[in-house]
Every structure is written in C-alpha cells, then in structure tokens.
Image (cartoon, rainbow, N blue to C red):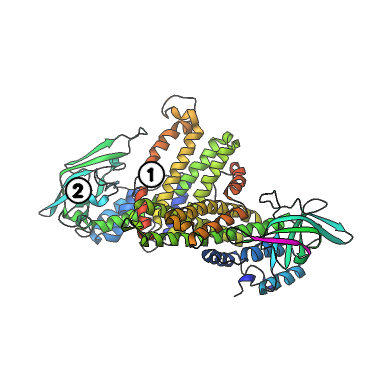
Amino acid sequence: MGWAGWTELQRHLWHEEMQRAGVPTPLPFNVSMIGPVLIQFASQEMKERFLPATASLDIWWSQGFSEPDAGSDLAGLRTSAVRDGDDWIVNGQKTWTTLGQYGDWIFTLVRTDPAVKKQAGISMLLIDMTSPGVEVRPIQLIDGGHEVNEVWFTDVRVPGENLVGEVNQGWTMAKFLLGNERVGVAPVAMVKRMLGRAKEVAADQLDDPVVRARVAELENELLALELTTLRVVAHSDGGEPHPASSVLKLRGTELQQAVSELVVDLAGPASLVPPDSESDLPLWARRSAPVYLNYRKASIYGGSNEIQRQIIAGTILGL
Amino acid sequence: MGALGLPFSEEDGGMGAGPVEVGLVAQEVGRVLAPEPYLAAVVLAGGVVASLGTDAQRAEVLGELSSGNLHLALAHAEPGRRWSDTASSVTATLVGDEWRISGVKEPVLHGDAGTLVVTAALPEGGTGAFLVAGESATTTTATAYDGTRVSRVVLDGARGVPLGEAGADATEGIAVALDRARITACHEALGAMEAALAATTGYLRSRKQFGVPLSTFQALTFRAADMYVAVELSTSMVWWATMVAAERDATATREAAARAALQVSRAGRLVGQEAIQLHGGIGMTAEYLVGNLKAHLTALDHLLGDGSHHLRSLAQGVAAYDALDPLA
C-alpha cells in the first residue's frame, strides 16, 4: 500500500495533507478497510492474490456489511453462505453499499452458522461481483445523487478459498475493520478546508457578528477535534485502535454536518438553484443544499452516533 | 514539595519548571478541590511579578513566595469592569518621589495577603503594577459560593513600589500573566471535570431505581458519554495551549489561552450541569462532591473571561486566515 513501514501517525498526517490539498484520498474500502483486514487475518496465499491488486486499484472493493434488518445491529445479518463441496452458496441482500456500482469485488459478512449466538456464526467472504447471481440495484438519495446500492445474492457460487481467515471468525474481523473505519471517518482536514473555503466565498458576510461567532466557535471545536485525533492516532500503534476512536467518529461527523449547515445558511436563497442548471449564482451556493442533505448520512454510517455513545458508555465508562 | 516555586526561575528562588508542571499541579488542585490559593498567589500574583519585576524584586518576592513565607495576592479586577488587561478606576499618582495608589479593587482572590500586587492607571496613561503592603489597604474578605476567599480591597493613598520601571506601561506584562493564569485555570477546571465525570459514572453504576442500576437506562448513559466527549476534547485543547505557552511567544499564547478557555467554558458548564442532573437531588447538596465541583467550575469560568468573552475576541479575527492551523 506504499506505507507498509509507516506508523499510524505518519499515515494520519499524510491523509490530512491529502485532504487539505483537495486530492481525492485512496479508496477507503481498499486501503482502510479490507487491506488491513487481509494483512492481519488472511492466509499468505490470499495476501499474495489480493493485496497487490488492492493496492493498485486493479480491484475496486465494495463493502457488504449492512443489511435491511441489520444496520447498526450488524451481527443480526441474515445473508447466508452454505457449503456445497469446496464452494459456498450465498443467498441474501446487502444494502447501503457505497459506490457499489463501480465495485469489482465485495467483502461480505455472511452467516455460516445459524445455530449459535449471532456474533459467533459469521464469516467473511470475498465475492467477485461479476459472479452469476450478483445484482446491484441503485438507491436514490435526498440529495439527488446515486452513491449507495442494494446488492442481491441469488445462489451465488463462491470458491472456498475466498474465505478470509477461519470459518465463523468474521465478527472479530468486522470489529477490527470498524475500529479502523471510525478513525478514518473524522475527516478533520477536509472539514477545515470546507470551512476555510466558506469563509473565502462568503467573505462579505464575515462582517456579521453572528456569522463570525458561528465560524469562530466551529473553528475552535474543529481544533479540539484535530488535537484529539492526534492524541488518539499517536496511541493507536500496534493494531488495536484507541477506544476513544468513537469520540472521533461522533464529534467528527457532528462537525462535518455543522459546517455543511453553515455553508447552506451562507448560500441562503441561492441554495435553491440546482448545481447543474444554467444560473448566475455561484456553484458553491447551488451545491450547498445537496451537500448538506448528503452529510446527514455521516451520523448514521460507520456505526451510528448512538452506537458510538453506547461504545463510549460501555467500553470506556463501564456503564 | 516545591509546588509554589514551579513556574519561577532558579535565580528567582523557584524550581525552573514551566506551564506543563504548573498545569499538572493545578489539575490535581481542581480534582480534589483543594482550598489552596495556588492559582491566586503563585500563578496570578507571582506571574505578574515574574513578568514585570526587576531582578532584585523577582529574587526577593518570588523567592519568599516559593519558600512559602510570603502570601501574595493580585488586586487587578475593578468594580464595573469585565476581564480587562488594564486598570482604570484605581489610580497611581506620584507624590514627591513616592507612588500613591487609590481606589477599590474587587473581587481580589485571597486578598487578605501579606503583600498585594496592585494594578493602577498611570498619570500619563497606561497601567502600572505596584507592590503594596497588605496592612496599608483596608480589606474585607468573604467566602464565595465555591469556598474561594474573595476580598474587597480599598486603597486610600497607599504607598506602592513600582514593579519594574517606574511609570512605564505594564499592560503587556499583565496580559502575559493573565493568559498563563487562564491556561492554569483551565487545568483546574479539567481536574474538576474529570472528578465530576468519575463521580457520575460511579453513581450511575451503583445507584438503583425501579430495582435496577441507573446504568441500565440508555438515556442516562448517553448523557454520560457526551460528558466524556467534552472532557476529552478539553483535555486535548488545554494541553495544547499549555505547550504553546511553554514554547511560543506571548501572541500565540494569548490566542491559545482564549481557545482553551472557550472550550473549557462550554465543557465545564455541560459536565457540571449534567453531573448534578444525573445524580438527582443528592447532587444539589452541599455535603456531596459534584455540587461543589460545579460551583468551582462556575467560579473558574467567571474568573478570567468566560466562553462568550473569548469567543468575541476570536470572532474578531476569523477573516484574517482561511483555515486554522494549530502549528502556524
């Protein structure tokens, strides 16, 4: 992945610089999610088969975790994988598959033992999305865009060697992956950039003391989050994410939403005009409402913010 | 233990430590609500002497302060004014070759002290700082709601010895001491918030209502989680400001102090209020810890500038840069 020898802190700083420069960051499904899981849990054979293509983006990965009845209650998933000789036969439905329309492969959590406690009967399978029986259906969202999908599996035949780690070890890998995901979903530099840009394009409104105060308060909150992120990242070396990574997810997404809300307020009536129409109004203003609406997702995905509060209360505070 | 001399140089009789060590002490003071005038005597009054005094003054005053022989207090706040670096209604006049100080200072933390550091408006403009013998002022002292001793100090032509160069404007030196004290107050608040959170989570685990521990009610545990988030974010900000104070210039320290104070003001209110609410009635009682922690958090919040005060100053400057950089 080009950063094999890097510490968590170095990796974090590199990410922040990329965001600050407005450069698209590497596909998170590849580098933050399945990549580290393969490094940690996969057989040598599987690593050699998948890691180079994951690093070079020859495989665009999708994430097949959430299901219609198992969102935040991830362990309640029902998509099943049943042995048939050396293969697995997969049936079920995944949802909220982000950018799944571009996916070559999907890493999925599947139920391999329905008889045991729900966390204990889950495995992780890698599935070629061109396999017969895989169908990707778009979901339209309130911002007018298409970024999530349903993925349906109907008698999809998956070779036995595509199982990651051991059978029924999936929950361990899922928790490992989600911990990393939480660290990654506090895009402080991106939000700072968004706020900095808002100040630039709406400079005439900075005379308004109410606007100024709102900006200053958000900047301070972002600074506190940035410093906290550095603390958490610096203590995350050695695989296990710092337990306080839940703070980053919780607060990072709240601030991301708050800044997008400020931007739509700065745009005012101009926010009603669609971004793709012919207009005299600036593009940032016309994009502001779709972005604001789109970011309502942030406190839901990656373990909703209520789940993060539950983790903080349970794991950190012992409640 | 040398705690009194931590911030002062060894030549001045101190320990030659810095804001980091002072912060650690203040955090413990806040955690246990120690009724010691550490912030008042060492950081505020001692801080003004350290930034303005001559070599001889520093060695004498700070040496005595560090060894615990001298009780020093800063008389700076004036009735009718809110968190200013300057003095206005208390004035200094030159009578012959002696400086005479007149006016009322209030509130003065632990003002019933052996020696007062008094700020006063100078005849030619600007603000000076003077050493005044405690017995040459009329002092009445009361106990504030959090147990802090607060005094009204009346000066009626009291003799003052100028700190540093006589007649020179000392506003900058006073501001430096106030900013350092703000960061130290943040540490005290941090200790108090940690104690309030720990008491609250302990209570939620042990207290039973409707036959089950309070910790089985999600509405309550989520509020405790938000308290934790506030404490963590404050911890990051306060320690960052402390490192800025230890390594950077006065301008950088001023802004960092304002940022930490804003964060801690918001967090202190949330944590203190929620600690009482989650405890229920017992949290209101004077004999129980969390009410006292909340009272002290309230006092610290209003001592050197509350959240709105610091937000106002930070808001003035938002147009001057694009994105905030903690290392810039």
Left or right for A104, reference A230: left
Choose between B110 and A151: the one closer to the eye: B110
Q: Position of residue A237 (x, y in %)?
A: 40, 62
Give whichever of B78, B226 is nearer the camera: B78
Check the picture and name the quadrant holding the N terminus of chain B.
bottom right
Residue B194 visible in the shown view:
no
Q: Is residue A171 above or below residue A292?
A: below
Please state which amino acid type lies under the numbered disc 1.
Answer: Ala
| On screen, residue B309 above or below B279 | above
Q: Position of residue A70 (x, y in %)?
A: 25, 47
Which segment is the magenta one?
B136-145
Mark 2–mark 1 contact, CB under 8 Å?
no
Q: Earlier in the sequence, mark 2 or mark 1?
A: 2
Label annotation for residue B287:
none
Residue at the outermost left position: A85
Q: Quote the CA–CA distance across marks 2 and 1.
A: 25 Å
Question: Dot 2, crowdedness within 10 Å: few (<14), some or many (≥20)?
Answer: many
Magenta region, main secondary structure: strand
Q: At 88% across and 62% down in the image, what residue appears? A: B97
Give the image location of residue A243, x and y in percent.
38, 59
- Quadrant of the rendered image containing residue B36: bottom right
Residue indicated by mark 2:
A78
Three-letter code for the amino acid on which mark 2 is drawn? Arg
A53 sits left or right of B102 in the view: left
Q: Which residue is mark 1?
A: A298
